[in-house]
Image (cartoon, rainbow, N blue to C red):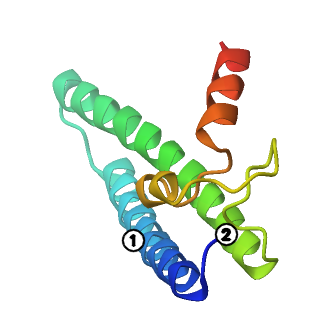
Amino acid sequence: MLNATQLANFKEQLLARKLKIIKNLDGTNLELNAMRELELNDEADHASISSDTIVDSAIMEQQYKELAEIELALDKIKHNTYGICEMCEEPIGIERLKVKNFARFCITCREITEKEQH
């Protein structure tokens, strides 16, 4: 189990990452709105803007997913279930949490869930 200091550190990291993602999403939304308002002169401009928008949308989708994972992890901290595998209910190793602080599964169970998804 994690001690109070470790838990506080993970919470601080999660909150910092959450703020960074929200800031990124707000900035990307502003950029996308600005691009929509541009007067495009030719097909090359339109194609360039279109591909940028696709990439930005994919990045935003990934960031929304990460934000949801972070929210879940913060909720788990609040309910004293942070760092517990959702599948086997064993503690998730601290080294794994250091790499992915919103991990929902221990290494073993993560491998099982990934195999099931493919």
Q: Quadrant of residue 31?
A: bottom left
Classify residue 71 as left or right of residue 27.
right
- Observer-nearest of 78 and 87: 87
Provide the secondary structure element on which disc 2 rests.
loop
Residue 20 marker:
1
- Observer-nearest of 19 and 42: 19
Three-letter amino acid code of the residue under disc 2: Met
For the point 76% across and 81% down, the residue is 78
- Residue 108: image location, x then y, percent: 64, 33
How far, Cα to Cα, is label 2 from label 1?
Answer: 28 Å
- Against 57, residue 103 (above or below) is below
For the point 59% across and 52% down, the residue is 103
The mark nearer the N terminus, 2 or 1, is 2
Which residue is situated farthest in the top direction here?
A: 118
Residue 114 marker:
none
- Residue 9: image location, x then y, percent: 47, 81
Callout 2 environment at 10 Å: few (<14), some (14 to 19), or many (20+)? few
For the point 59% across and 38% down, the residue is 107
- Against 79, residue 43 (above or below) is above
- Against 21, residue 35 (above or below) is above
Which corner quadrant holds the N terminus? bottom right
Callout 1 environment at 10 Å: few (<14), some (14 to 19), or many (20+)? few
- Residue 62: image location, x then y, percent: 50, 44
Which corner quadrant holds the C terminus? top right
Circle 2 residue: 1
Q: How many marks?
A: 2
- Residue 10: image location, x then y, percent: 51, 74
Classify residue 37 as left or right of residue 65.
left
Provide the secondary structure element on which disc 1 rests.
helix
Q: Nearer the viewer's eye, disc 2 or disc 1?
A: 2
For the point 73% across and 17% down, the residue is 116
